[in-house]
Image: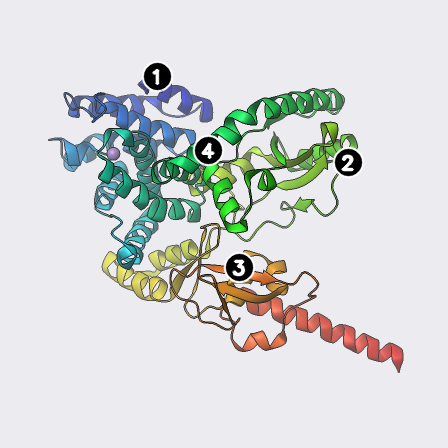
Amino acid sequence: MSHSINNLLKIIRKNNPKADLDLVKLAYEFAEKAHKGQKRLSGEPYITHSIATAETLAKIKADIPTIVAGLLHDVPEDTDVSLKEIEKNFGKEIADLIKGVTKLSNVKYRGIERYVENLKKMFVAAAKDHRVMVIKFADRLHNLKTLKYLPKYKRERIAEESLKIYAPIAGLLGVWHLRWQIEDECFKYLDRKNYEKLKDKYEIKQQKERDELIKTVKKTLSEKTKKENIKYEINGRFKHLYSIWQKMQNKKKKFNEIYDVFAMRIIVDSVSDCYKMLGIIHSIWPPKKDRFKDYISVPKPNGYRTLHTTVFGPKGKLIEFQIRTKQMHDEALYGIASHWRYKNPTQARSSWIDEILRIQKNSKDSKEYIKKLKFDIFQDRIFIFTPKGDVIDLPKDATPVDFAYHVHTEIGNQCTGALVNEKISPLDTKLKNGDMVEIIRDKNRKGPNIDWLKFVKTGSAKDHIKRYAKNKGLIATILKKITH
Ligand code: MN
């Protein structure tokens, strides 16, 4: 794909018609001049990397200062033009963003011992201004896309570093759109054989079937929605290869066993249209029992909102529909990158971001802030991995029960055991940084064990257990009244 200033301006205009394009054009000319004569290893002019980074930022609906900083991000490090000159021309906000990006360039993956240390550096950067991280993700994504021009040993180190450090943090900040792309690029370099195999199965062999299904679904929907006056977009190709691969690994299943359900996404204008669309879909194709999830009235703990339903579609083929508004879509894919667009972001941020912001507000100066940050957050937080590779942050000494409730209330209520780093472990095990935890559930189990209160650490686990105990107490009292 070729990157150009016109293409960049087009993307910005589409997402943000009122944007100040003059500043973007000015930044482009400034960067172009500064990088003049420099080439990427691909042989292309260096400016293509700056534009590609800015294009990615524009696509995830980042604000203008972020996009401008994306264009200029390599200027102070790789050219004779200093940060001071950038500040003089573009102001302190943009200069500070670039300074943050430059500082992060020496964070490298050097084995698991230094992994947490590197994560901390990233989190400090994210805490100061999360836009710095978002620029870094976009920068890294283009470097990954042009990795083939680097020597092999460098390729693997960068891919590994991106998969282990950048991808999980992108997920934590809710920028899933970049996390998935980063993961797929890394997958390609770290496990080419399986990557190619999966790509062939998902993108090539299934494509015809998928395209036909989308066509049929679109046609049927457009007939049924004519009278309803409902506007919508539909898309049927959005799963990414690395997550399919991880699912296959974790569940020890073959592609066809995992991927027997087509997924389609429908984007509408309002919350009421989400439910209207759900009604229309259920009136055309019968829903599969127990597969309807209303994450709009009850969002996931990370703030995710969408309606999910699985139906018996054309020719009895199972289709999962995901129905959401544009805002829900932006929040689900772009996370904090697009937050500025919504005056009342309803999406719950992960708890540590709130904590970081609280500390930032209550600190006298940056020295005190960093000190507090170290003691209040990183000393007392641990990062735990799900089998899918998601990172969940929990307080120190948290147990598998805390983890289970963090993932989902049902999982907490039904947990009977845990695998910690693939070993069966008691539910009161104190988890350590970097542990991978999988919960063993008993679906017949009705509720938590009150004794868990003795060891759980998170407020949310405590609340759920207490609430259950309270309800049970109520039922016992009522039963007593009836029988006596
Ligand atoms: Mn760069």
Alpha-carbon distance for marks 2 and 1? 47 Å
Point out the frontmost of discs 1 and 4.
4
Residue 35 badge: none
Point out the frontmost of discs 3 and 4.
4
Q: Quadrant of the N terminus?
A: top left
Q: Residues within 10 Å of mark 3 (few under 14, many from 20)?
A: many
Residue 256 location, x and y as percent? 59, 38
Write down the residue under mark 2: 286
Residue, x 31% and y 40% (percent of image)? 159
Q: Residues within 10 Å of mark 2 (few under 14, many from 20)?
A: few
- Observer able to see residue 95: no
> Are circles 3 and 4 on residues that touch, CB within 8 Å?
no
The correct choice, above or below, for 45 with respect to 394 in the image is above
Amino acid type at circle 2 is: Pro
Residue 406 badge: 3
Residue, x 34% and y 37% (percent of image)? 189
- The image quadrant of residue 36 is top left
Residue 6 badge: 1
Residue 244 location, x and y as percent? 51, 40
Q: Earlier in the sequence, mark 4 or mark 2?
A: 4
Indicate left or right for 438 with 281 as reference. Answer: left
Amino acid type at circle 3 is: His
Alpha-carbon distance for marks 3 and 4? 35 Å
Alpha-carbon distance for marks 3 and 1? 45 Å
